[in-house]
């Protein structure tokens, strides 16, 4: 009888070890992938400077456009922070998928969409500053970044 309990306990321990190992590895792999994606996003402007090889003449115009974009981005990040806080509050209060929860989700998505629109507008705003070759490189960088999520 004791052997049976021992075997059952051993089986449960093995299953738990395998399950937690899988969970750990999965989280580790996804974390690394997300870190890579976010690192790419945060280093985008540095990559643009490096890859496009901006000239001394282009640089001040590029920086002016970047400054305007950064101000817009900071405002949108604050709106996103507030929208997420509102969603958290409504979620906590309603404890169900209510109209208020849906409205809060819609607001988060609206701000996300606005962030993406501002990024696209920013990238299009720098195109007139670039040479034909630089524009081709920019287009390639953008499409590569967008296609990165297809994997």
Image (spheres, rainbow, N blue to C red):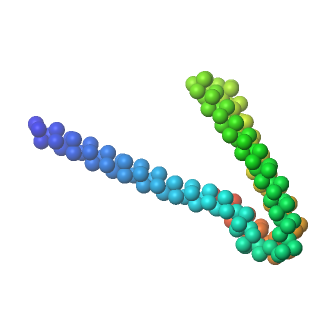
Residue that extends furthest to the top in the rendered view of this protein:
94
Using residue 62 as the reference point, say whether residue 38 is left or right of it.
Answer: left
Name the image quarter holding residue 68: bottom right
Q: Is residue 147 above or below residue 87?
A: below
Place of residue 95 in the rendered image (x, y in percent of width and height, measured from the top left): 57, 25
Total marks shown come to: 0
Residue name at image x 57 percent, y 55 percent: 34
Instruction: Name which residue lies at 16% across and 42% down.
Output: 6
In the image, residue 100 above or below residue 144:
above
Q: Is residue 146 left or right of residue 132?
A: left
Residue 29 visible to the viewer? yes
* Residue sitting nearer the eye, 30 or 51: 51
Q: From where the camera sits, is residue 109 visible? A: no
Q: Where is the N terminus found, in terms of image quarters?
A: top left
Q: In the rendered view, does 97 fall on the left or right side of 115?
A: left
Residue drawn 76% across and 50% down?
Answer: 73
State the residue at coordinates (77%, 75%).
53
The percent coordinates of residue 102 (x first, y second) are: 68, 31
Q: Residue furthest right?
A: 128
Relative vertical location of residue 5 with respect to residue 122 in this rendering, above or below: above
- Find residue 69 and report its image quarter: bottom right
Q: Quadrant of the C terminus?
A: bottom right
Residue 16, image x, y percentages: 32, 45
Q: Position of residue 85 (x, y in %)?
A: 65, 34
Task: Indicate the quadrant where residue 101 lies.
Answer: top right
């Amino acid at each position: 009888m004791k052997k049976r309990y021992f075997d059952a306990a051993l089986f449960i321990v093995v299953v738990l070890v395998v399950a937690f190992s899988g969970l750990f590895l999965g989280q580790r792999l996804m974390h690394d992938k997300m870190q890579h994606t976010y690192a790419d996003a945060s280093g985008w402007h540095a990559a643009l400077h490096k890859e496009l090889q901006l000239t001394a003449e282009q640089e001040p115009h590029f920086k002016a456009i970047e400054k305007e974009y950064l101000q817009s981005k900071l405002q949108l990040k604050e709106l996103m922070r507030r929208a997420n806080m509102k969603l958290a509050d409504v979620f906590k209060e309603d404890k169900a998928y209510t109209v208020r929860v849906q409205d809060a989700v819609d607001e988060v998505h609206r701000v996300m969409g606005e962030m993406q629109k501002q990024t696209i507008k920013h990238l299009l705003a720098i195109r007139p500053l670039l040479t034909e070759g630089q524009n081709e490189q920019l287009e390639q960088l953008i499409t590569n970044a967008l296609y990165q999520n297809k994997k």
